[in-house]
Amino acid sequence: MKRRTFLPTLLAFFCTLLITVSCAQNAPQADAPAEPAPATATAGEPVKMGYSNWAGWWPWAVAEAEGLFEKNGANVELIWFDGYLESIQALAGGQLDANGQTLNDTISFLADAANGMVTVLVNDNSAGNDKIIVADGIDSVADLKGKTVALEEGVVDDFLLTLALEDAGMKRDDVEIKNLETGAAATAFAAGQTDGFGGWVPFWETALSREGSKEIITSKDYPGAIPDLLVVSQKLIDERPEQVQALVDTWFDTLAFIKANPDRANEIMAKRASVSDTEFEKYTEGTKIFTLEENLEAFQAGGDDMKYMPYAAQKMTDFMVKVGFIPQAPDLSKLLDDQFVKAYAAKK
C-alpha cells in the first residue's frame, strides 16, 4: 500500500512516464487497457480515471461493480494502478482525465501537469493511518530534540512531524531527518538505527516491531493534514463538465450504497485491495471518509485551520518550498473547485 511518494525533479518525472504505461499493463483489473493512449475529453469517449491501493479510494471499486457509474451518467474507464506514483504521473502527463491522489502530491506536480490538475472532491482524510513512531525512552514530542527520525523527506509524514514540532514550540531543525524511502526508514528504525520513524500503513507495523517502540503522533491528531482527493484535469472540466459532475454524483451514491449494503461493499473492497479481513478493518478505521457536509466545509476559503483546504494547500506549499522539495510555489488559484460538490448539494 505504498503511497504519497513521488520524484522530486522534472527530469525524473519525464523519464518515468514510460514506466507508467507498463505498470498499468500489469494491473490485475480486467478493464485496464494494455497500453493507455493519451486521454482526450471529446464527447462519447470514456473518462480515464485512475485509482490505487488506499482505503479512501477503494469505494470506486464498488461503484464499478454495482453499475453506479452508469446509473449516474458517468462514462468511465476505471484503471487500477499497483503503483500510486505512476497514477499521479499518468494524470500529470495527460494519460488520465482523473485520479485519486493526496493534496500535497497534487501541489507537487501542479506546475508541470499537461492539462492542469483540479481538486473537485475530498474522498477522505488520513485519521491514524500515518504515524510518528519513537523508541523507548522518548515520551513526548519535546523529547525528540536532537534525535534522529527516519522518513521520506518532503512528503506527508515529514509535514505531519513538522506540524507537531511547531505545536511543541520547536522547529524541524531541532531533529535530525534521515531521508530514506518509507520501507527502508521503517526497517532502519526497527533495527535500532534511528530514534524515530514517520510513515504510513503498513510500514509503521514494521517500525512497531521494535521492542519498546510506540506512536506519539498520528494523522488523527491533525485533521486536514493529509486529505485524499478526486483530482481531474482542467481540460476535462472545460470540455466535459457534465462528466465531472457525474463522477462526484457517483461518489456520494456509492457511499449511500456502502451504508445500505456493508457486507457486499466490504467484500468488493477487500477483494480489490487484496487484504485480509483484519487488515481491511484496520486500514478503514484509520481513514475518515468525508460526508457531503464535510466536503463543503473543506473547500471553504478564509479558514485558518488545516481542515480548510485553501489554508492547508498554502501551508503545504510553503513547507515543500522551505525544505527544497519543490523549487517554487505553483499557482494555486485553480487547484480547488467546489462547483460540483455544491451542485450535488443543491440537488439534494
Image (cartoon, rainbow, N blue to C red):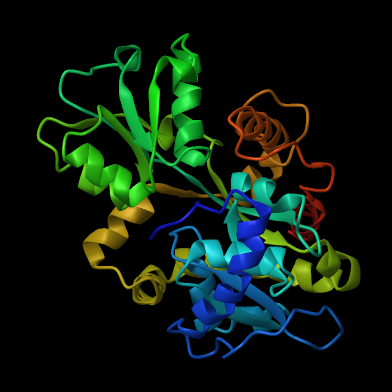
95 and 325: which is toward the camera: 325
273 and 314: which is toward the camera: 314
> Picture coordinates of residue 186 (x, y %)?
27, 44
> Picture coordinates of residue 173 (x, y %)?
47, 17
Which quadrant of the structure image shows residue 100? Answer: bottom right
Q: Quadrant of the C terminus?
A: bottom right
Q: Residue at x 54, y 53 (%)?
A: 6
- 194 horizontally vs 105: left or right: left
> Picture coordinates of residue 40 (x, y %)?
81, 80
Looking at the rendered structure, the number of numbered marks drawn on it comes to 0
**Eyeballing the image, is 308 above or below 129?**
above
**Eyeballing the image, is 322 above or below 329?**
above
Which quadrant of the structure image shows residue 275? Answer: bottom left
- 112 horizontally vs 25: left or right: right
Q: Residue at x 37, y 55 (%)?
A: 284
Asked if residue 253 can be seen in this view, the reply is no
Asked if residue 42 can be seen in this view, the reply is yes
> Picture coordinates of residue 181 (x, y %)?
39, 48
Q: Quadrant of the N terminus?
A: bottom left
**Eyeballing the image, is 47 above or below 7?**
below
